[in-house]
Amino acid sequence: MPPKSRTPRIVAVGSPLTLPCGVTLPNRLAKAAMSEQLGEITGAPSQTLTRLYSAWGRGGVGLLITGNVMIDRRAYVEPRNVTLEDDRQLEAVSNWARAGSRAGAVMVMQINHPGRVAVGSLHRRPVGPSALRPEVIGYNLRKPRALSLDDIADLRRRFARTAELAVAAGFSGVQVHAAHGYLLSQFLSPLANQRTDSYGGTPENRRRLLLEVVADARKAIGPNAILSVKLNSADFQRRGLEEGESLDVALALEQAGIDLLEISGGNYEAPAMTGVVQDSTREREAYFLRYAEDLRARSTMPLMLTGGIRTLDFMNDVLAQGAVDVIGLGRPFAIRPDIAADLLAGTAEPQVLPTAPRIPLPLAPVNSYLQLAWHAANFRRIAAGDKQVSGPGAVRTLAAAGAAVTVRALTQF
């Protein structure tokens, strides 16, 4: 397939971007999804979470993508995820949407199901495309149950219902999470998906559920709301999803009419999205830029690049070259809620900010979770009004994370 023509353009992080659905982002900076773990025990967004997004929204960012919002209260990614499966939490969700968008940022809800990496008690079996344990310490204790066709139909309804409720509550759209080893990513992976029915066996069958969920979500939210997908460039695992097949998935998503594709990579076994696992082919600043450039040669779909981006010059360069359309940042927002305003003014660089502590052992999954817990501790301080935080050390981070898991276990599972 020959490359599509693309007119060279000069853009910068401060330029607006109108997505295919008609929604305009005021600038090209996005707060990428991070797991806040600030939901109430009921699954509703807490006042702390609402205040956090208010701080981020005031900080000048163009696009705010929430952390995981679960489509099923029986399956959580981490303790204290927000859940949206019916209208019981709609008022609190509406308050959350208004808080983030009040200063002009566009709010998008990331919707997800963890599949076989769901947290929970040992007696509760997670689900997945096949009855295969993940290859990661802790998550391999419970053998998942393979989803039936009826289960898959129910999952499709749940994704669509959560998308519908998100837009009804005031979000500008949704991001379907199909990366990082969660359920839809598991279906894409030939390592995790060994089904022999219409949802497995071939690349076309493995991506069937994702395309069905996208079609269902579009029908639920209509043509004028943002429909985004987060997709792995690769799983960074032997026999997992590889770049060639991922490019085919991305092109199929373009044909399905999504508005924005966020490019990421990795999963619980190989958490490349956190920088813990290094890509041996990476020669430049962003983790997944080469994939974005390969996709751009074949696609005009709006692309968002997240992971490892460290300088304003780099952001402006890749935008000006047309390789991507939106720059996603995660960890910088866990330190400085107003980092976007400073970047837009040219007075700050993400690379000077502190980073999460790591345990000096080859334990990538542990260090990946340590980063999530460290960020969550920072989020509470930002919500309380801090303008810049440095985060606790490794011991205090793990202690706080353990306490949060214990509380959830005693009250929810």
Image (cartoon, rainbow, N blue to C red):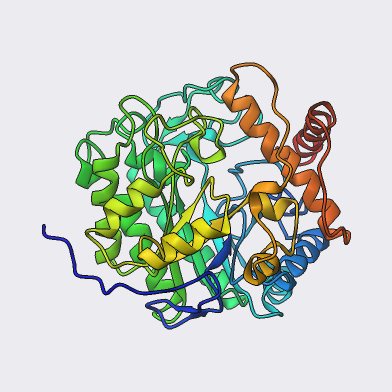
Question: Residue 35: in sight, yes or no?
Answer: no
Residue 147 falls in image quadrant: top left
Judged left or right of residue 199, residue 66 is: right
- The location of residue 57, given as percent across then percent down, is 70, 71
Question: In this rendering, is residue 383 above or below 54?
Answer: above
Nearer to me, 258 or 122 = 258
Question: Residue 315: in sight, yes or no?
Answer: yes
Q: Which residue lies furthest to the left in this view?
A: 1
- The location of residue 8, given as percent across then percent down, is 30, 72
Question: In this rendering, is residue 284 above or below 366?
Answer: below
- The location of residue 336, given as percent across then percent down, is 75, 57
Judged left or right of residue 347, residue 259 is: left
Nearer to me, 312 or 77 = 312
Question: In this rendering, is residue 51 above or below 238?
Answer: below
Question: In this rendering, is residue 304 above or below 128?
Answer: below
Residue at 33 percent of width and 47 percent of height: 291
